[in-house]
Image (tube, rainbow, N blue to C red):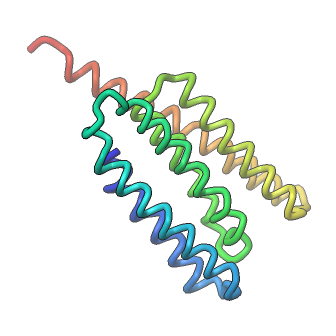
Amino acid sequence: MNLLNRYFAPFAAMLILSAVHFGEVDARARNMAWAVLVVSAVVNWWLSKNTYRWIGWATRLRQLQIWLTFLWTVPLFWLLHGFWGPMWLLFVMAPVTAALYGNVWTVLGMSLVSSGTMIGIYALHGVEGEVWWGQIGTQAVFIIVMSLFTYSLAQTALKLRDMPR
């Protein structure tokens, strides 16, 4: 989870701060986004700090953190995607994190859930037009490809690490 904390948490914070600052977000959405951001930061910090304290639970805590990352993404995307286009990138975080700790089926499942949820939210908000759906489809495919790419990189690194010298 250190990689998540080092790279993705600051990126997510930057996305949210950019949306709030540049996107002219209404006060209600801004306050709710701040609340989700703060709660997710505290929970993520606590889980990361305690994962190795309960080493027997480390695998379950990692899985929990992956799903929580997905769960934080849903309300943040719901609230802010209309104000800041790049918010869809939040849906990459949970599958890529799964790619570092799970097997290929976990990664594929999480990336399909993330992509499907993103598509569903766009549909619920009434996105119309062939160009928009083309972009949304490209975003969904990117989430899946990036997750599988990261999984392959992680597996290659493990193989290289375990090679006899």
Quadrant for residue 164, please give it.
top left
Q: What's the residue at 60%, 36% (across, down)? A: 110
Residue drawn 43% across and 28% down?
152
State whether residue 85 is above or below residue 131: below
Q: Quadrant of residue 67?
A: top right
Q: From the viewer's perspective, is 159 left or right of 79?
A: left
For the N terminus, give its image quadrant: top left
| Residue 16 point in image, percent of width and height | 54, 72
Q: Quadrant of residue 72?
A: bottom right
Q: Is residue 98 left or right of residue 49?
A: right
Viewer-proximal residue, 2 or 61?
61
Circle count: 0
Question: Is residue 156 shown to the viewer in this render?
Answer: yes
33 in relation to 134, above or below: below
Question: In the image, residue 11 lies at what x, y percent?
Answer: 43, 63
Going 74% across and 72% down the picture, which residue do you hit?
82
Is 39 above or below relative to 64?
below
Q: Is residue 33 left or right of residue 98?
A: right
Q: Is residue 101 left or right of residue 113?
A: left
Identify the residue at image location x=25%, y=40%: 53
Q: Is residue 150 visible?
A: no
- Residue 104 vs 46, above or below: the answer is above
Q: Of residues 52 and 26, which is closer to you in this image?
A: 52
Quarter in which the C terminus is drawn: top left
- Furthest residue to the top? 164
Percent across and percent down for residue 143 are: 60, 44
